[in-house]
Amino acid sequence: MRKSNQILLWDQATVKLLDVRHIERVQGEILHKYKIPASIFLLSVHGSAQVQLDQSEFSFTGFQVLHSGKGATLNIVPTSKNFVYYIIYYRASIQEEDLFQTQYCFSPDAPILLYNKMQLMHQKWNEQEERLNVRSLFYQFIHQVLKELHRKETEVKQTSVAVQVITYIQEYYAEPITLDSLAEVFNFSAYHLSSLFKEYTGMSPIDYLIRFRLELATELLKSTDASVGEISASVGYKDVYYFSRIFKKRKGVSPAHFRTREIQRPKVAESPSNFPTSSIFEYIIQQYINNDNHYHDTEKGELHMFKMSKSQTTAALLLCGSLLLSACSSGTGIPAKEQSEGNGTAKQVTSEESSNTRIVSTPKGDVEIPAEPKRVAADQYMGHLLKLGIVPIGARTFMLDEGWMEKAEIPKETIKKIEDLGDFPLNLEKLTMLDPDLIIGSIDENIEQYEKIGTTVFLPYWEGLKTAGPLDKFRGVSKIFGKEKEAEEWITEYEQKVAEAKLKLAGVIKEGETVSIVQFSQKAVYVLAAKGGNYGSSTIYDMLQLPPTESAKNMAEGFESISLEVLPEYLGDYIFVYNGDADATNKAMESNIWKGIPAVKKGKVYLYDDNYHDEFVMEDPFSLELQLDTIVNLLLGTTK
């Protein structure tokens, strides 16, 4: 980056100074694996030391300037009687630029100018009334550093942000790591950090994390007697079943099978423990602090949350070099498509990709997708997909346990083959592992994250507080897969069932009578609209065409939230009560307001649902068929 651009960024940034410290280390007093909690400038002024910043090592003698961003790991081993340095901690508001995260080190041509400013900053830092003066000195210090950098542009040793991320992953692989958490650590947006990392390594940070974990697990399986569960937990996977599935996808066999196979192989002569390690680690023996609220190291720092065993340390040292080299030289680093089994209710899912593509229109524009997607992941529309004969490879947790599945006799074997991808947004790590060729997202704010993983189609389930008609939803899903014909065939059959149901209900609701749908919660009462509602309203109003009240017709959204006191004004001659919250429903029905409502007195109240776990939560084809039967039976007073 040119000096003029750097000056412009510093001028535009909002900078907050966090601490200015003067530190003296005697020989043998080692700073070990100190996780830097903010961007820093370090100026050494006396003595010598071996300094390691992530993967880069420096020999410090006399005056040296070092800069790094938040999240890097710093090691300092004094090699003289004492080693003296100053350190400034700061944060800058511009997070999309690399400037404040870049690592570099150089010997200044005018060290005394930098030293004088640093010394004055340290002297005045603890004087509250001098803080403004300190900020002024800091900008003078920055100006001098930029001048030095400009003169030494070809001499300054810089470290890629990707290398910093790699070092972080190798240190904290056993802890929960997501793309968002990495972005927070390194002060980048998730998209920008992922782009920088992929440009450097050919793969995403999460894919690198998965590879690192699995290679470490491979070494542990070969070199220890630890159980698969113990190894799974030690490399960051608390769910051993999930670990086994990932391992099998990447390695082709289960962890247990892999271990058995390796035991039968001849032993390799060279042990990983004989591999060379970085010279600086020979000196490091002490603890370090890892606390974002402290901007200094201490001999009594916090212990690391995860302690590696001897075998894990061996494997990690081996991986540090081999994974980095392979990442930088493997091109895209994208794994081959892997096969996922189908089942009796849908086409078999294979790893073979269609050579053809087609264009589908979405609210976010046209998207090019595979002509016949084989590996589909979705955060909504489970029933729609299954009705079209498509078994997704992954879905949102809620989709895997919907109340209609057992009633619709969906085979449990089918559901077991669908990976649980968590809540909104879908678990990005698991989603990456599945390597989908098509992702269907229903919430606008999540689409950008999904697009980083694979081809994504945005199909909104809700639009504001309204939801599209269920038949339109089904048609929308079918168009993605070119299955409009299959969808229309089901719709024709369903509409015939609706016509038969309307004949059965003829005369139940008299001319001029109206129907209302309400739902009770602990904080409010919801009255569903004639259009755009959910929880059975489309079946009652659109399909069976039961007459809504004027208030239901005039609602701008899919529902209105009201108080119990005004509820009588919204109710018709027949009341359907969606029993999503049994406690709230019972409490409301015990009130004098409820008991005084005419429809209640006449016994024209129909209670349905079992606490958000039934066919009325979703509006897929399976649910619609069950809803139709339920409403007809309620009105006729019959049971199935």
Image (tube, rainbow, N blue to C red):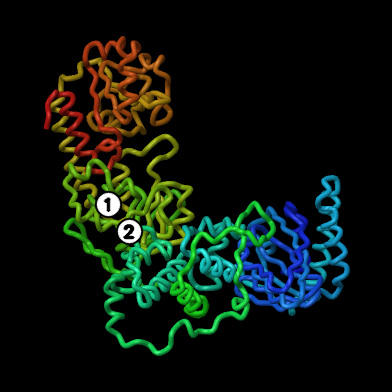
Q: Is residue 611 left or right of residue 113?
A: left
**Pointer 1 local density, CA inside 10 Å: few below 14, some 14–19, many at least 20:** many
Q: Total marks drawn?
A: 2
Q: Is residue 531 left or right of residue 117?
A: left
Position of 550 relative to 276 (above/below): above
Name the residue: 24% across, 43% down. Answer: 621
Q: In the image, is 542 to the left or to the right of 211?
A: left
Q: Is residue 278 above or below residue 136?
A: below
Is label 1 in a helix, a strand or a loop?
A: helix
- What residue is drawn where x is 24% and y is 38%? 615
**Which residue type does callout 1 highlight?**
Leu
Q: Residue 380, percent across and down?
A: 34, 48
Residue 174: x and y, percent? 46, 63
Residue 187 in view of the camera? yes
The amino acid at mark 2 is Val
Q: Within the image, what quadrant is residue 51 found in?
A: bottom right
Examine the image and state in which quarter residue 456 appears. bottom left
Q: Which residue is mark 2?
A: 376
Q: Residue at x 67, y 67 (%)?
A: 102
Circles 2, 1 touching at the beta carbon (< 8 Å): yes
Q: Is residue 150 visible?
A: no
In the rendered view, tell whether residue 442 sits above or below residue 349.
above
Q: Quadrant of the N terminus?
A: bottom right
Task: Identify which residue is drawn at 31% across, 9% down.
Answer: 596
The residue at which mark 1 appears reads as 385
Q: CA separation, marks 2 and 1?
A: 9 Å
Q: Quadrant of the C terminus?
A: top left
Q: Position of residue 100 (x, y in %)?
A: 69, 62
Earlier-in-chain disc, 2 versus 1: 2
